[in-house]
Amino acid sequence: MSEHFIINGGKKLSGTIPVYNAKNAALKVLAASILASQPVKIANLPQIEDINRMKELLIDLGAKISSDIFDCSHLKKTALNYDIAERFRASIVLTGPLLTRFGKAVFPHPGGCTLGKRPINFFIDGFKALGASVKKSGSNFVVTSQNKKLIGNKFVFPMVSVTGTETLMMAAVLAVGRTVLKNAACEPEIENLSIFLNSLGAKISGAGAPTIVIDGVKSLKGGVWAGMPDRIEAGTFVILGAATNGNIKVENCDPNHLDVLLVMLEMVGANLEIGKNYITVKPSKKLRSVDITTREYPGFATDLQAPFTVLMTQAEGMSLIHETIYNGRLFYTDILNQMGADITMADPHRVIVKGPTILYGKKINSPDIRAGMALLIAALIAKGQSAIDNIYQIDRGYDQIDKRLQALGADIKRVNS
C-alpha cells in the first residue's frame, strides 16, 4: 500500500518548526560505529527511510542494536546486503570502515536518488592508494587489503567528493601510518564526523578544510555522538517561510552553516531575524529575483537548489539557476511548469525562471528527496488542491514532515491508497 500527500494550498503559515539531527551526518556516524571495538551511543536519529536502511545493513552485517546503542564489536561478515545496498547510495560509506577493520569489503554499485552520473572511481582509487586491491566479481566490487591492513598514503581527489572524503577518512583511521587527503570536501558534516571519531580515539586533524591528516591508530573505543542540526532541513524551512510569506521560526539550527543562502535571501528581499540557534522568517513586501550557482560547501548547496527555484517562481524578474554539482537535477522544473511556473531549460545544467507566477494545485510525483520537498513547497503556495505521489522519496530525508507542517497551519494529509 502506497502513501501520498493531499495538500490544499494557500494557507498562511506561522509558528515554530524544529530542525532535527542531520541525516547526512547521522548516516556516516552509523557507518563509523563499525570502527569501534566497543558499543557506541547514537541518539536522536531522524526517523527516516535512509536511516532505517543503514540500520538494516548494519544488522545484516551482524551489528546488535538496542534503542540508541550500536554494538559492532562482533560483526559476522564484510559483504553488504546486495538488495539494500544497490538501491541506497550512502551504503558505500560502510566500505571504508569494513575494509580498514577487517581487511575486506564487498559491495555493489550503490543506488539512491537518480541524479545523473555519480561515479565511484574516487573510492576505488583511494582504496588502491592505501594499498588495497580491487576486483569485480559479478555485480559486486571486492576490496581487500594485504595482511588485513591499509597503509597510510597521500591521496588527492581529482574533484571534490563529500562521500569520498568521509569514506577514505574512516578507512585511514585504522591504517598503518599517516594518510593525507587533499582537495577534500569541507562540509560541516565531515568535521562533525571527525569530532566523533576523535572522541573514540582517532587522530584526525584538518577536517572541514581541503587538507585532512589522519594518523592511524590500532583500535577505537566506545563513545557518544553529540549530534548536529540538519543544515539542509533548516535552509529548506527558511525558504519555505519566504515562499509562503509566512511568519516562521526555524529553531535548533546553526545559521553559520547557511551563510550563502542567508545572503541570497536578503538579496531576494526576505525579512529575516537571525539568532544564535534560530532563524525567523517574517512576511516581506516584495521578492526580487536573483541568480544562483550551486557549489561545494561553503557555496550554495545543491540540496537547496530545488526549493530556491520554487521561491524564484514567486519573485519579480528573471532568475538563472545554474546546477554545477549533479547532472539531471533540474528535470523537476517540468512539473513546476505544469503547475503554472514559467521556467525555461537553457541546457541540462541551467534554467531560467520568470516570476512572479501563480501556481495551481495538481497531481504530481516526487522524483527524489530534494525535488520532492520543493514540489511540496510549491503545493503549499499553490491555489487549489495537490496530490503528491511517491512520498517515500520525501520520507527518505524529512522526518514527520507532514506533522511539522501541520503545526504551522498547513493543510496537508498523509493518505493511504
Image (cartoon, helix red, strand yellow):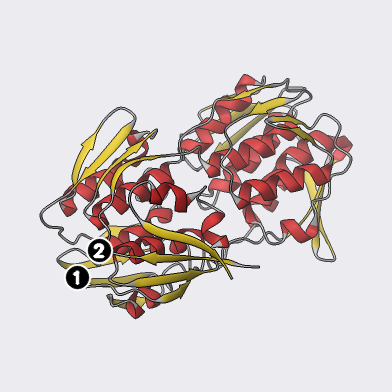
Q: Is residue 239 visible?
A: yes
Question: Taking 391 as reference, is 178 above or below it?
Answer: above
Instruction: Give percent across and percent down for residue 228.
Output: 49, 32
For label 2, count other residues whose C-alpha is less than 10 Å away and answer few (under 14), some (14-19) or many (20+). many
Residue positioned 24% across, 52% down in the render: 242
Residue situated in front as seen by the camera: 233 or 137: 233
Question: Taking 95 as reference, is 320 above or below it?
Answer: below
Q: Quadrant of residue 279?
A: top left
Q: Secondary structure at mark 1?
A: strand
Q: Quadrant of residue 258?
A: top left
**Residues at discs 1 and 2 in contact (Cβ within 8 Å):** yes
Residue 312 - label: 2
Residue located beneath label 1 in the image: 355
Q: Residue 175 vs residue 316: left or right?
A: right
Q: Secondary structure at mark 2?
A: helix
Question: Taking 185 as reference, is 346 above or below it?
Answer: below
**Amino acid at the residue labelled 2:** Met
Instruction: Give percent across and percent down for residue 237.
Output: 35, 48
**Amino acid at the residue labelled 1:** Gly
Cα distance between the residues tagged 1 and 2: 7 Å
Residue positioned 27% across, 71% down in the render: 383
Residue 315 - label: none
Residue situated in front as seen by the camera: 15 or 226: 15
Residue situated in front as seen by the camera: 297 or 277: 277
Instruction: Give percent across and percent down for residue 316.
Output: 14, 66
* Total marks placed: 2
Residue positioned 75% across, 47% down in the render: 57
Q: Quadrant of residue 341?
A: bottom left
Q: Quadrant of the N terminus?
A: bottom right
Q: Quadrant of the C terminus?
A: bottom right
Q: Residue 158 vs residue 318: left or right?
A: right
For label 1, count other residues whose C-alpha is less than 10 Å away and answer few (under 14), some (14-19) or many (20+). many
